[in-house]
Amino acid sequence: MALKDLTRKVYDKTLDLASRPNALMWLFAIAFIESSFFPIPPDIMIIPMVLACQKDAYKIAGTATIASVLGGCLGYAIGVFGYEVIAKPLLEFYGYMESFHEFENSYHKYGAWIVFIAGVTPIPYKLITIASGIVRLDFIIFTIASILARGLRFYIIAWLLKRYGEPMKTFIEKNLNLLSIIFVILLIGGFYIIKYL
């Protein structure tokens, strides 16, 4: 099966799931695990869910925000309580041990900004949640930065899709393959930024 056909099939299936009664439950689960160890961001579900049911746009964004912040707290706990058993192997798996040690010293000074930037951009948020736990970034600062960042990201997506729903849906469907490539590039770029900057 060609990548083009596979992308279309996944998109159509996600649109179908997004309109089902249990879609919010699946979104909650994906947003939760993405913040601590799962590689696929919840945006991939938020977009078709809002397109399928624009009146629930902010409910969808709120669900993703709450689940993502709670998942981030799990990532923080992994860093605090499971560094040797879980966090260290995860950081090594993603190739981030060396770069983690390089910025560890300045983490407390800029920790809130690091969490915020990772929460809004394609930089892998899960790595920042774990790193925050490892260096024991103030948990209240971590939580506030996470709420602001994830809320901003998901509510902006929801607002744009609610406001420009049909044109956005047409644009996505027309340019699905290009958008998939851009998404992968941004995801890889986020990992690259963490590793080399």
Image (tube, rainbow, N blue to C red):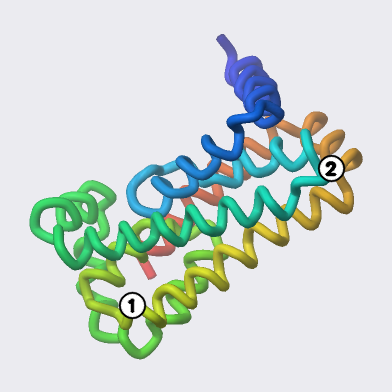
The numbered disc on residue 168 is: 2
Q: Tell me which label, 1 or 2, sits earlier in the chain.
A: 1
Say which element carries label 2: helix
Q: Residue at x 66, y 48 (%)?
A: 60
The image position of residue 14, as x and y in percent, is 63, 27
**Residue 16, quarter of picture:** top right
Residue at 33% x, 77% y is 139
In this rendered view, identify the residue nearer to me: 152 or 56: 56
Residue 169 vs residue 93: left or right?
A: right
Q: Name the residue beneath numbered marker 1.
A: 139
The quadrant of the rendering that contains the C terminus is bottom left
Give above or below for 26 relative to 188. Answer: above
In the rendered structure, which amino acid carries the disc numbered 2?
Met
User: Callout 1, which amino acid?
Assistant: Phe
Residue lying at 51% horizontally and 46% vertically, measured from the top left: 41
Q: Position of residue 178 (x, y in %)?
A: 70, 36
- Other-residue count near label 1 (Cα within 10 Å), few / some / many at <14 / 14–19 / ≥20: few
Q: Nearer the viewer, residue 177 or 41?
A: 41
- Image vertical order of residue 20 relative to residue 101, above or below: above
Residue 142 higher or lower than 17, as above or below: below
